[in-house]
Amino acid sequence: MRNVHVDLGLKSYEIEIERGLLPRLGRKIKTLLPKAEKAAVITDSNVGPLYASVLKKSLEKEGIAVTVLTFKAGEESKNLQTLGTLYDGLAEAGLTRSDAVIALGGGVTGDMGGLAAATFLRGVAFIQIPSSLLATVDSSVGGKVAVDLPSGKNLVGAFYQPKAVYIDPDLLKTLPVRYLHDGLAEVIKYGCIRDRDLFVTLENIQNDAELLNRADEIIETCCNIKARIVEQDEFDNGERMLLNFGHTLGHAVEKTFHFDRYSHGEGVSIGMVLLTRQSEKLGLTEYGTADRIAALLQKFQLPVNVKMRQDDFLRAIALDKKKRGSSLTLILLKKIGDSFLQKVAFSNLPDFLPGK
Ligand code: GLY
């Protein structure tokens, strides 16, 4: 068992990482929330059929009545309409404040399940059981919960920390390979911003089988990095922004292609490389860094370039919620493992964009 403690005072919690954890979670959840008599398991149409019944059985064995609420898989479900149907499901299940909402799935499930938990009855205990690599290393940790609006991603949300995050790396075995690599882009990001050793470890991994074999230690390393950052800056006003390395350009790529050509991790992959090429040219990043990142990403079939004009980037970034006033904060690397925040006036942004 690997354990990462997230120290947030009264909101502190554990991230537990262990293969074969899922069928044993009933006992753990009963111990964590002894007053819970009911649980709503929120899941999607891909993950639910694979894993919800195992979790339900395990909870029922501990005397917890379970309602499974399943929504159609995909980012397009992460909206106020689906959230509304989840609220109806929670009300019909008769959930009370001493009960629990459990998100079983990837980033969409965790974000939307978390927002449901944060707001139903003004807050019900929330547990994350992430099933994708991206969710295990990023979205399930740190308490960001949200749904999208037609005008942008994650525009309605909250900071609402889970009571626990339970990671069973065996769940990754059923993850389609594209989404394994999607999550790997975020893993590589951690290496870039904070951990040269992690980056080198990933450089030495030859294929997906080896990656999955070493998933436990890799997830633990990433969760440790994220936990330390969130402890310093829970509400995303400073250091936590380092986690956005590659994301400003990446979101612009995702948005320009209407969120159906590139996944989140693929956008981040392109964003990390293109931004680092520019910051190398500006003398802000050690020479050769972009090529090294690109080589690692390409080994796992991640894209590192895109056909987009500078204007396309500017248009998409102008709508980005990370933009504050007339400037925005970009995350740049000094070198692999060493990152910093760079405030950039919107008028100077073209210097940091490709296509000039
Ligand atoms: N996914 C970035 C963060 O949690 O801040």
Image (spheres, helix red, strand yellow):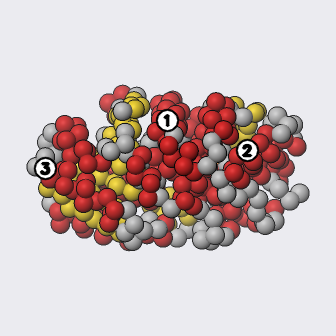
As drawn, 328 above or below 83: above
- Of circles 2 and 1, the one toward us is 1
Q: Give the spatial CA distance, label 2 vs label 3.
A: 47 Å
As helix, strand or loop, the secondary structure at mark 3 comes to helix
Tag 2: residue type?
Answer: Ile
Q: Is residue 14 above or below residue 320?
A: above
Look at the image and tell me whether residue 9 can be seen. Answer: yes
Q: Residue at x 68, y 40 (%)?
A: 203
Q: Secondary structure at mark 2?
A: helix
Could you say whether the residue bearing mark 1 is in a helix, strand or loop?
Answer: helix
Dot 3 corresponds to which residue? 61
> Residue 31, how many percent across, how many down?
19, 37
Identify the amino acid type marked 3. Lys
Which label's residue is closer to the chain start, 2 or 1? 1
Amino acid on which disc 1 is placed: Glu
Front residue of 119 and 290: 290
- Disc 2 within 8 angstroms of ligand 1 (CB): no
Tell me whether circle 1 and circle 3 mark residues in contact (CB < 8 Å): no
In this image, 40 relative to 196: left or right? left
Residue denoted by label 1: 217
Q: Residue at x 60, y 71 (%)?
A: 260
The residue that label 2 is drawn on is 293
Front residue of 347/287: it is 287
CB within 8 Å, label 2 to label 1: no
Q: CA distance from mark 1 to mark 3?
A: 31 Å
